[in-house]
Image (cartoon, rainbow, N blue to C red):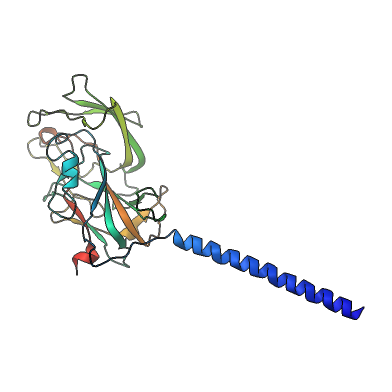
Amino acid sequence: MTNIRHQYKLYNQMLLILIMSSIWSSCKKDKADHTSTSTTHPVTAQSSAYVTQMLEYKPAPGQFINTSTGNATAAQSVLNTNAGLVSLGAFGGYIVLGFDHTVINQANQNDIIVYGNASTGFAEPGVIWVMQDTNGNGKADDIWYELAGSTVNQTGYRRNYSVTYTRPANGTGDVAWTDNLGNSGTVKANSFHTQAYYPTSITSNTYTLAGTLLPSTNIDSSNSTYVTSTAFAYGYADQTSGGDQIDIARAVDTNGNAVQLTGIDFIKIQTGIQYNLGWLGELSTEVAGVADLSLLKK
Protein backbone atom coordinates (compact mmCIF):
# COMPACT_ATOMS: atom_id res chain seq x y z
CA MET A 1 0.00 0.00 0.00
CA THR A 2 2.86 2.35 0.87
CA ASN A 3 4.48 1.71 -2.53
CA ILE A 4 1.20 2.48 -4.33
CA ARG A 5 0.80 5.71 -2.41
CA HIS A 6 4.39 6.66 -3.23
CA GLN A 7 3.82 6.01 -6.93
CA TYR A 8 0.58 8.03 -6.84
CA LYS A 9 2.35 10.95 -5.13
CA LEU A 10 5.18 10.81 -7.69
CA TYR A 11 2.63 10.77 -10.52
CA ASN A 12 0.92 13.91 -9.09
CA GLN A 13 4.27 15.68 -8.78
CA MET A 14 5.16 14.89 -12.39
CA LEU A 15 1.72 16.07 -13.53
CA LEU A 16 2.15 19.32 -11.59
CA ILE A 17 5.55 19.88 -13.21
CA LEU A 18 4.04 19.36 -16.69
CA ILE A 19 1.22 21.81 -15.95
CA MET A 20 3.60 24.46 -14.59
CA SER A 21 5.90 24.01 -17.59
CA SER A 22 2.95 24.55 -19.90
CA ILE A 23 1.89 27.70 -18.04
CA TRP A 24 5.46 29.05 -18.08
CA SER A 25 5.77 28.41 -21.80
CA SER A 26 2.48 30.21 -22.39
CA CYS A 27 3.62 33.18 -20.30
CA LYS A 28 6.89 33.36 -22.21
CA LYS A 29 4.97 33.35 -25.49
CA ASP A 30 2.62 36.11 -24.27
CA LYS A 31 5.59 38.15 -23.14
CA ALA A 32 7.32 37.72 -26.48
CA ASP A 33 4.16 38.69 -28.36
CA HIS A 34 3.77 41.81 -26.21
CA THR A 35 7.36 42.81 -26.85
CA SER A 36 6.92 42.42 -30.60
CA THR A 37 4.19 45.07 -30.60
CA SER A 38 6.73 47.71 -29.52
CA THR A 39 8.63 47.64 -32.79
CA THR A 40 11.38 50.14 -33.36
CA HIS A 41 13.09 50.76 -36.68
CA PRO A 42 16.79 51.32 -35.93
CA VAL A 43 18.94 54.10 -37.33
CA THR A 44 21.27 52.94 -40.10
CA ALA A 45 24.06 54.60 -42.03
CA GLN A 46 21.49 55.52 -44.68
CA SER A 47 18.93 57.04 -42.28
CA SER A 48 17.88 60.63 -42.92
CA ALA A 49 17.52 63.15 -40.13
CA TYR A 50 14.46 64.47 -41.97
CA VAL A 51 11.07 62.95 -42.72
CA THR A 52 11.18 60.83 -45.86
CA GLN A 53 7.51 59.97 -46.43
CA MET A 54 4.47 62.12 -47.11
CA LEU A 55 1.58 59.81 -46.25
CA GLU A 56 -1.40 62.15 -46.31
CA TYR A 57 -2.18 65.77 -47.03
CA LYS A 58 -5.69 66.96 -46.25
CA PRO A 59 -5.84 70.76 -46.03
CA ALA A 60 -8.70 72.89 -44.82
CA PRO A 61 -9.87 75.66 -47.17
CA GLY A 62 -7.54 78.63 -47.32
CA GLN A 63 -6.04 81.39 -49.43
CA PHE A 64 -2.98 79.29 -50.37
CA ILE A 65 -4.88 76.09 -51.11
CA ASN A 66 -4.83 75.03 -54.78
CA THR A 67 -1.69 77.15 -55.32
CA SER A 68 1.99 76.22 -55.48
CA THR A 69 2.17 76.10 -51.67
CA GLY A 70 -1.17 74.37 -51.14
CA ASN A 71 -1.20 71.16 -53.19
CA ALA A 72 0.24 67.63 -53.16
CA THR A 73 3.49 68.73 -54.78
CA ALA A 74 4.01 71.32 -52.05
CA ALA A 75 3.32 68.62 -49.46
CA GLN A 76 6.11 66.50 -50.98
CA SER A 77 8.51 69.47 -50.86
CA VAL A 78 8.96 69.15 -47.08
CA LEU A 79 10.68 65.76 -47.35
CA ASN A 80 14.43 65.47 -46.69
CA THR A 81 14.72 69.20 -46.08
CA ASN A 82 13.86 72.14 -43.88
CA ALA A 83 13.34 74.41 -46.89
CA GLY A 84 10.06 73.20 -48.39
CA LEU A 85 6.76 74.91 -47.68
CA VAL A 86 3.19 73.69 -47.56
CA SER A 87 0.10 75.43 -46.17
CA LEU A 88 -2.45 73.44 -44.17
CA GLY A 89 -5.31 75.94 -44.56
CA ALA A 90 -7.75 76.87 -41.80
CA PHE A 91 -8.56 74.86 -38.67
CA GLY A 92 -8.09 71.11 -38.97
CA GLY A 93 -6.01 71.00 -42.15
CA TYR A 94 -3.20 68.47 -41.69
CA ILE A 95 -0.23 66.63 -43.13
CA VAL A 96 1.04 63.18 -42.11
CA LEU A 97 4.77 62.51 -42.48
CA GLY A 98 6.98 59.52 -41.74
CA PHE A 99 10.61 58.92 -40.78
CA ASP A 100 12.77 56.11 -42.17
CA HIS A 101 13.64 55.15 -38.59
CA THR A 102 12.15 55.38 -35.12
CA VAL A 103 12.85 58.71 -33.43
CA ILE A 104 13.76 57.61 -29.91
CA ASN A 105 12.20 59.37 -26.94
CA GLN A 106 15.35 60.75 -25.29
CA ALA A 107 15.14 61.41 -21.55
CA ASN A 108 14.78 65.04 -20.47
CA GLN A 109 15.29 66.62 -23.86
CA ASN A 110 13.52 67.62 -27.05
CA ASP A 111 13.46 65.02 -29.79
CA ILE A 112 11.96 66.62 -32.92
CA ILE A 113 12.15 69.97 -34.66
CA VAL A 114 9.29 71.19 -36.86
CA TYR A 115 10.14 73.97 -39.30
CA GLY A 116 7.57 76.57 -40.41
CA ASN A 117 7.62 80.17 -41.60
CA ALA A 118 6.79 82.00 -38.37
CA SER A 119 8.26 85.42 -37.66
CA THR A 120 8.52 87.60 -34.58
CA GLY A 121 5.04 88.57 -33.46
CA PHE A 122 3.33 86.35 -35.99
CA ALA A 123 2.77 82.67 -35.25
CA GLU A 124 0.21 80.31 -36.77
CA PRO A 125 0.22 77.50 -34.20
CA GLY A 126 -0.25 73.92 -35.31
CA VAL A 127 -1.08 70.98 -33.05
CA ILE A 128 1.42 68.13 -33.25
CA TRP A 129 0.41 64.46 -33.08
CA VAL A 130 2.76 61.47 -33.00
CA MET A 131 2.44 57.76 -33.62
CA GLN A 132 4.66 54.77 -32.90
CA ASP A 133 4.59 51.90 -35.38
CA THR A 134 3.59 49.45 -32.65
CA ASN A 135 2.32 46.79 -35.05
CA GLY A 136 5.49 47.01 -37.12
CA ASN A 137 3.80 47.17 -40.52
CA GLY A 138 5.31 50.48 -41.60
CA LYS A 139 1.90 52.14 -41.93
CA ALA A 140 0.40 55.03 -39.95
CA ASP A 141 -2.47 52.88 -38.69
CA ASP A 142 -1.78 52.75 -34.95
CA ILE A 143 -2.83 55.33 -32.32
CA TRP A 144 -2.26 59.07 -32.65
CA TYR A 145 -1.21 60.87 -29.48
CA GLU A 146 -1.32 64.63 -29.07
CA LEU A 147 1.83 66.31 -27.82
CA ALA A 148 0.52 68.50 -25.02
CA GLY A 149 1.64 72.11 -25.38
CA SER A 150 1.42 75.07 -23.03
CA THR A 151 -2.27 75.81 -23.67
CA VAL A 152 -3.64 72.51 -22.34
CA ASN A 153 -6.73 73.12 -20.17
CA GLN A 154 -6.58 76.88 -20.66
CA THR A 155 -9.72 78.78 -21.70
CA GLY A 156 -10.29 78.16 -25.40
CA TYR A 157 -8.47 74.82 -25.47
CA ARG A 158 -10.78 71.99 -26.51
CA ARG A 159 -10.22 68.38 -27.49
CA ASN A 160 -12.56 66.59 -29.92
CA TYR A 161 -13.42 69.75 -31.82
CA SER A 162 -14.63 69.43 -35.41
CA VAL A 163 -15.49 71.72 -38.31
CA THR A 164 -17.48 70.97 -41.47
CA TYR A 165 -16.66 72.98 -44.59
CA THR A 166 -19.04 73.48 -47.55
CA ARG A 167 -17.96 74.11 -51.12
CA PRO A 168 -19.18 77.50 -52.45
CA ALA A 169 -21.93 77.23 -55.05
CA ASN A 170 -19.84 78.96 -57.71
CA GLY A 171 -16.60 77.20 -56.75
CA THR A 172 -14.81 80.34 -55.59
CA GLY A 173 -15.44 82.90 -52.85
CA ASP A 174 -15.97 82.49 -49.12
CA VAL A 175 -16.10 78.93 -47.76
CA ALA A 176 -18.79 78.43 -45.12
CA TRP A 177 -18.14 76.33 -42.02
CA THR A 178 -20.06 75.02 -39.01
CA ASP A 179 -18.59 73.37 -35.92
CA ASN A 180 -19.76 70.78 -33.41
CA LEU A 181 -20.47 73.52 -30.86
CA GLY A 182 -23.16 75.18 -32.99
CA ASN A 183 -20.94 77.99 -34.27
CA SER A 184 -20.61 79.03 -37.91
CA GLY A 185 -18.51 81.33 -40.05
CA THR A 186 -16.57 81.56 -43.29
CA VAL A 187 -13.04 81.22 -44.53
CA LYS A 188 -13.09 84.55 -46.30
CA ALA A 189 -11.69 85.03 -49.78
CA ASN A 190 -9.55 88.09 -50.51
CA SER A 191 -8.36 90.01 -53.54
CA PHE A 192 -4.78 88.73 -53.25
CA HIS A 193 -5.77 85.13 -53.95
CA THR A 194 -8.70 84.62 -56.31
CA GLN A 195 -8.52 80.86 -56.92
CA ALA A 196 -10.91 78.38 -55.29
CA TYR A 197 -10.12 78.04 -51.58
CA TYR A 198 -11.98 74.73 -51.22
CA PRO A 199 -9.45 71.95 -51.99
CA THR A 200 -9.89 70.54 -55.50
CA SER A 201 -8.68 67.20 -54.10
CA ILE A 202 -11.94 66.93 -52.12
CA THR A 203 -14.64 65.56 -54.43
CA SER A 204 -17.57 65.86 -51.99
CA ASN A 205 -19.34 69.19 -51.42
CA THR A 206 -18.75 69.01 -47.67
CA TYR A 207 -16.08 67.47 -45.48
CA THR A 208 -15.26 67.46 -41.79
CA LEU A 209 -11.93 67.90 -40.03
CA ALA A 210 -11.49 67.10 -36.35
CA GLY A 211 -8.76 67.70 -33.80
CA THR A 212 -7.77 69.90 -30.88
CA LEU A 213 -8.76 73.56 -30.89
CA LEU A 214 -6.24 76.00 -29.44
CA PRO A 215 -7.09 79.36 -27.82
CA SER A 216 -7.10 82.47 -30.00
CA THR A 217 -6.27 84.71 -27.03
CA ASN A 218 -2.75 85.44 -28.33
CA ILE A 219 -4.15 87.13 -31.45
CA ASP A 220 -4.60 90.91 -31.52
CA SER A 221 -6.59 92.14 -34.51
CA SER A 222 -7.78 95.38 -32.91
CA ASN A 223 -5.52 97.30 -35.28
CA SER A 224 -6.71 96.08 -38.67
CA THR A 225 -3.55 97.20 -40.44
CA TYR A 226 -1.18 95.52 -38.00
CA VAL A 227 -2.46 92.15 -36.78
CA THR A 228 -0.27 90.18 -34.37
CA SER A 229 -0.37 86.55 -33.31
CA THR A 230 2.03 85.90 -30.44
CA ALA A 231 3.56 82.45 -30.07
CA PHE A 232 2.50 80.18 -27.21
CA ALA A 233 5.15 79.25 -24.63
CA TYR A 234 5.93 75.82 -26.12
CA GLY A 235 4.64 72.70 -27.80
CA TYR A 236 3.30 73.78 -31.21
CA ALA A 237 4.41 74.09 -34.83
CA ASP A 238 4.95 77.27 -36.86
CA GLN A 239 5.66 79.46 -33.86
CA THR A 240 9.37 80.19 -33.89
CA SER A 241 11.68 81.46 -36.59
CA GLY A 242 14.21 78.66 -37.08
CA GLY A 243 11.83 75.90 -36.01
CA ASP A 244 10.04 74.57 -32.94
CA GLN A 245 11.68 71.87 -30.83
CA ILE A 246 9.31 69.28 -29.42
CA ASP A 247 9.55 66.63 -26.66
CA ILE A 248 7.96 63.23 -27.37
CA ALA A 249 7.59 62.75 -23.60
CA ARG A 250 4.64 65.20 -23.72
CA ALA A 251 2.43 62.65 -25.50
CA VAL A 252 -1.09 62.28 -24.05
CA ASP A 253 -4.09 60.11 -24.86
CA THR A 254 -7.61 61.28 -25.70
CA ASN A 255 -8.31 61.93 -22.02
CA GLY A 256 -5.15 63.96 -21.51
CA ASN A 257 -3.32 61.21 -19.62
CA ALA A 258 0.43 60.94 -20.15
CA VAL A 259 1.60 58.13 -22.45
CA GLN A 260 5.09 56.64 -22.38
CA LEU A 261 6.34 56.07 -25.94
CA THR A 262 9.64 54.37 -26.73
CA GLY A 263 9.80 56.53 -29.82
CA ILE A 264 7.74 57.62 -32.83
CA ASP A 265 7.72 56.83 -36.53
CA PHE A 266 5.01 59.20 -37.81
CA ILE A 267 4.03 62.79 -37.15
CA LYS A 268 0.86 64.73 -37.98
CA ILE A 269 0.78 68.52 -37.94
CA GLN A 270 -2.61 70.23 -37.93
CA THR A 271 -3.77 73.85 -37.92
CA GLY A 272 -5.03 74.49 -34.39
CA ILE A 273 -6.94 77.77 -34.55
CA GLN A 274 -9.99 78.95 -36.50
CA TYR A 275 -9.51 82.69 -36.95
CA ASN A 276 -9.98 85.33 -39.65
CA LEU A 277 -6.96 87.65 -39.64
CA GLY A 278 -8.60 90.28 -41.83
CA TRP A 279 -6.58 91.34 -44.87
CA LEU A 280 -4.02 88.65 -43.93
CA GLY A 281 -6.61 85.93 -44.54
CA GLU A 282 -7.26 82.92 -42.35
CA LEU A 283 -4.77 81.67 -39.77
CA SER A 284 -3.13 78.65 -41.41
CA THR A 285 -0.19 76.61 -40.16
CA GLU A 286 2.68 76.19 -42.62
CA VAL A 287 5.27 73.38 -42.56
CA ALA A 288 8.73 73.59 -44.13
CA GLY A 289 10.17 70.30 -42.82
CA VAL A 290 10.54 68.00 -39.82
CA ALA A 291 13.71 66.43 -38.40
CA ASP A 292 15.05 64.08 -35.74
CA LEU A 293 17.17 66.30 -33.47
CA SER A 294 19.42 63.43 -32.41
CA LEU A 295 20.57 62.94 -36.03
CA LEU A 296 20.94 66.64 -36.72
CA LYS A 297 23.38 66.87 -33.83
CA LYS A 298 25.66 64.19 -35.27
Is 191 situated left or right of 107 in this image?
Answer: left
Q: Nearer the viewer, residue 10 or 173?
A: 10
Q: Is residue 178 left or right of residue 121?
A: right
Q: Residue 293 lies in what quarter of the image? A: bottom left
Considering only vertical position in the picture, is 35 above or below 213? below
Q: Is residue 272 visible to the viewer in this orientation of the structure?
A: no
Is residue 60 or residue 36 the one in the foreground? 36
Q: Is residue 222 above or below residue 34?
A: above
Q: Position of residue 162 (x, y in %)?
A: 33, 35
Query: In terms of depth relative to the viewer, which is nearer, 197 or 71?
Result: 71
Quarter of the image that includes the N terminus: bottom right
Q: Percent from the top left, x then y, of residue 55?
A: 28, 46
Residue furthest bottom in the image: 2
**Left or right of residue 147: residue 23:** right
Q: Is residue 282 visible to us here?
A: yes
Q: Residue at x 39, y 60 (%)?
A: 39
Q: Quadrant of the C terminus?
A: bottom left
Image quadrant of residue 114? bottom left
Residue 271 placed where, x, y %?
24, 42
Image point 13% across, 43% down: which residue? Answer: 228
Q: Is 11 on the left-hand or right-hand side of 101?
A: right
Q: Position of residue 4 (x, y in %)?
A: 88, 76
Q: Is residue 8 above or below residue 103?
A: below
Q: Quadrant of the rendered structure where residue 87 is?
A: top left
Residue closest to the far right: 1
